[in-house]
Image (cartoon, grey):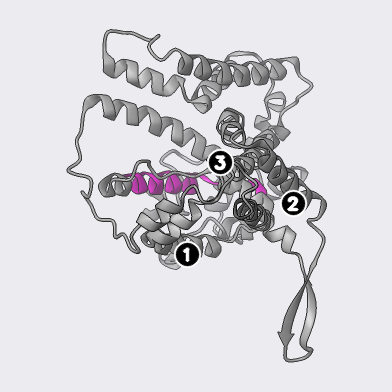
Amino acid sequence: MLGLSLFSLSTVQAASYWPIAIVQLLLLVVVSQYLKNVGMPLLSYNSDKGIHISWYPLFTYFPLLVVTLFTWILCLVLTAADLLPEGNAARTDISNGLIADSPWFIIPYPGQWGMPTVSLGSVMGMIASVIASIIESIGDYDACAKLCRVGSPPYHAVNRGIGVEGLGCVLAGIFGTSSGTASYTSNIALISITKVGCRRMVLWSGGIMLVVGVLAKLCAVFATIPEPVLGANLMFLFALITGIGLSTLRTINLNSSRNQFVLGFSIFMGLAVPDWLTRHPGVIQTGSATIDQGIMALLQTNMFVSGFLGFLLDNTLSGTLEERGLMHWNYFLQAHQTKCVSSTTKESPEDICYNLPFGMDAIKRWRWTKYMPFLPTYQGLRRTRKVADVTTINKMEAKL
């Protein structure tokens, strides 16, 4: 739903100058899909062969970067040759003043935009936004796991992810940023393009962004990327996001008329209701501005509307567990429970990837950690029910 709901954002940016946007989009499709297995000759060196030419799969790992740099340089050449009219969105000199006026360094600090204020209306609106963001993040976690070819995130991983996002939002509010911190679906699409899902890479990327965020001049340089190039990138990424979302339906029976109705109705209403409310912002009037703001925040969120209707219909319309795809999910849920209960079961690489990077020996040794919902040894507060054996679970995972 996120990919479908954001099509208007990408088309508005791409429409600022369609020729450049079309070139960028076509190159992205060709490079990332048709040329992904083509190697590029690069000079390499090792002690055995010395200086030699090796074939590096550049288009496999960096298709978005390569195409964006090419189109950016193309816009720079067209601007230098004055082949683009003044004020055209594809020109690279539109933001020259931004680069000149930006300081070299900016150090953020709490309260730099004034003391924070709190109102009931803003709190209600943020609560609605946070609920919608949690729903979106859970879907992001599962989609990322599918791309990395690991099992679905267990309870503790989801809880830990949501908690860290909440901590990020608190820090964002303290430092006065204009938005909260949450998982971003476009990054999942980048994993699909680059085939890189290493957590260490994510940590290094975060460190680089912290450094770049302080260098205001460098940030201003990135602001010179033409708007149609960004629009084409968004169109490509949102298309991948939509495909990733549809892949989660593989466990249900799509030949069932029941499932077809639930899927089609929830997707259509998830697009129609927020779009109509955006065009008619004052239509909800309960007599309380706070309640109006909260309701509008929820109903203008495509993920919430579609997810709520899908949840309601799927749980009220009759259907078998296999038809609804719940048989597979039951095995996944029981898998984590089985491996937590059995002390003799050896951890698989899929389980290890959801562990903490440090302190796991102590966490496994302490008994109280099984009651902490964000630790890998979490078993829940309820009595453990009888679960499927590990062999059966592995067979079901192999089928998927």
In this rendered view, identify the residue nearer to me: 229 or 116.
229
**Which one is earlier in the sequence, the residue at label 3 or at label 1?**
3
- Secondary structure of residue under mark 3: loop
In this rendered view, identify the residue nearer to me: 207 or 150.
207
In the rendered structure, are the residues bearing label 3 and label 1 in contact, judged by CB atoms less than 8 Å apart? Answer: no
Amino acid bearing label 2: Ser
For residue 357, which numbered disc appears in the image? 1
In the rendered structure, are the residues bearing label 3 and label 2 in contact, judged by CB atoms less than 8 Å apart? Answer: no
Q: Which residues are magenta?
A: 145-169
Residue shown at the point (49%, 47%) measured from the top left: 94
Q: Quadrant of residue 2?
A: top right
Residue 13: % across, % down: 57, 36
Mark 1 or 2, closer to the camera: 2
Q: In the displayed structure, would residue 187 be above or below residue 366?
A: above
| Residue at image mark 2 | 32
Residue shown at the point (61%, 29%) measured from the top left: 4
Amino acid bearing label 3: Ala
Residue shown at the point (53%, 46%) measured from the top left: 154
Residue 209 appears in the figure: yes
Quadrant location, the N terminus: top right
Q: CA distance from mark 1 to mark 2?
A: 32 Å
Residue 205: % across, % down: 50, 61
Residue 164 is left or right of residue 332, and the answer is left
- Magenta stretch, main secondary structure, is helix
Residue 84: % across, % down: 62, 44
Question: Which residue is farthest left?
Answer: 115
| Residue at image mark 3 | 89
Q: CA distance from mark 3 to mark 2?
A: 26 Å
Amino acid bearing label 1: Pro
Mark 3 or 2, closer to the camera: 3
